[in-house]
Image (cartoon, helix red, strand yellow):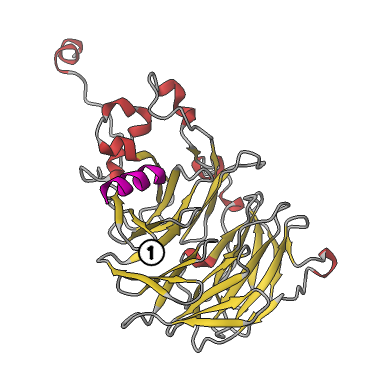
Amino acid sequence: MEAQIQNFGQTPSQLLIEPHPPRSSAMHLCFLPQSPLMFKDQMQQDVIMVLKFPSNSPVTHVAANTLPHLTIPAVVTVTCSRLFAVNRWHNTVGLRGAPGYSLDQAHHLPIEMDPLIANNSGVNKRQITDLVDQSIQINAHCFVVTADNRYILICGFWDKSFRVYSTETGKLTQIVFGHWDVVTCLARSESYIGGDCYIVSGSRDATLLLWYWSGRHHIIGDNPNSSDYPAPRAVLTGHDHEVVCVSVCAELGLVISGAKEGPCLVHTITGDLLRALEGPENCLFPRLISVSSEGHCIIYYERGRFSNFSINGKLLAQMEINDSTRAILLSSDGQNLVTGGDNGVVEVWQACDFKQLYIYPGCDAGIRAMDLSHDQRTLITGMASGSIVAFNIDFNRWHYEHQNRY
């Protein structure tokens, strides 16, 4: 037996219970972090790591609040089954791909899985068990994570509320009522110093409510004594159907929202309706909205159609793609658009005219959610297979390449 082992090697016991992903998919790099020097092609430069959660539930929300001054810089993920994870972020810029990068530096990977999920030890602290309305499709719009990673806001409950949970304990900390029907989407603005921000909730009652999140008291509303019945700052009306997507920009003082059908509407944060953004022909069903502080508003409509509007309502550009897009994201300067969908391919576009800048290697699962790290160097995608993939991203490189090319 020993001679046989010396000559021919030994058959190991079964290591994997899942089939291998197909070759040339980004998921094929599951083991890349442990042995980065095995791959020298484009994929190694593009994919940093893949993190597979024990639950196979699709990751439908990703929030990368990674600023170093936070108590817990982390990538917070939420799955379709409302299991969330606080995955600690390690600022590793400068280490990736460096000479001598080896197993000893495995902790230099940017994302470390939430130990309570990895060990399956504290899932009760990570599972939201409160019942959502059965008719609600859980997607990225159902969740908002506060800028300090300490609270998750979730909508879709049968009692027409949205709720605030502590990410530390998983406990319910506030229930907010105000709508006449089920709350279908949530969004938050960028945060002020101190963690204050605006929260917007959209509902089946065809209205939106603008709320104020107090970073000091960690509640909706200014007054901790009346946290049971906070009042909205404004009521935004004008839609004829259920609100399905919304984006809010505190710097511009604007809320842009889309209903199941009809034009997107632009409101001020005081509640005044400014204008309707009439999409081009066949752009009747808005599904995703992203707005930049420069005043660009990107809207994704059903069946792969994109439009870019100026904040004054002028249609600047439009395009159609074959993917069923599930997530869109603007870079912090508003110059670049990142898209991902059921095809499992991340694509980068120039926001102003939809010129394609880059296509990442395809993943073997659909993309459900995306976010960028604070330094705009890492893109994290939530996958339908229950994993997250971290990509290297460099907007400056494409900007210069594109300028030189044209």
Relative image position of residue 151 (x, y in whole percent): 65, 56
Q: Residue at x 43, y 76 (%)?
A: 314
Q: Is mark 1 on a helix, strand or loop?
A: strand
- Residue 303, relative to residue 331: is it above or below? below
Membership of 403 in magenta stretch: yes
Relative image position of residue 14 (x, y in whole percent): 28, 34
The N terminus sits in image quarter = top left
Work out whether residue 168 or residue 224 is closer to the camera in this orientation and state it: 224
Q: Which residue is drawn at 52% across and 86% down?
A: 239
Residue 366 is at least partly visible in this image: yes
Which amino acid type is marked by label 1? Arg
Q: In the rendered image, which residue does mark 1 sit on?
A: 326
Q: How many labels does the image show?
A: 1
Q: Neighbour class for label 1 at 10 Å: few (<14), some, many (≥20)?
A: many
Provide the residue span drawn in magenta.
389-406
Q: Which residue lies furthest to the right in this view?
A: 225
Work out whether residue 284 or residue 274 is closer to the camera in this orientation and state it: 274
Membership of 74 in magenta stretch: no
- Residue 262, relative to residue 387: is it above or below? below
- Residue 387, relative to residue 30: is it above or below? below
Work out whether residue 85 or residue 66 is closer to the camera in this orientation and state it: 66
Residue 392 is at least partly visible in this image: no
Q: Residue at x 25, y 42 (%)?
A: 20
Q: Residue at x 46, y 53 (%)?
A: 331
Work out whether residue 112 or residue 397 is closer to the camera in this orientation and state it: 397
Compared across the picture, whether 169 is left or right of 119 comes to: right
Q: Which residue lies furthest to the bottom in this view?
A: 240
Relative image position of residue 381 (x, y in whole percent): 41, 51
Relative image position of residue 404 (x, y in whole percent): 29, 45
Q: In which quarter of the image is residue 252?
A: bottom right
Q: In which quarter of the image is residue 366?
A: bottom left
Magenta stretch, main secondary structure, is: helix
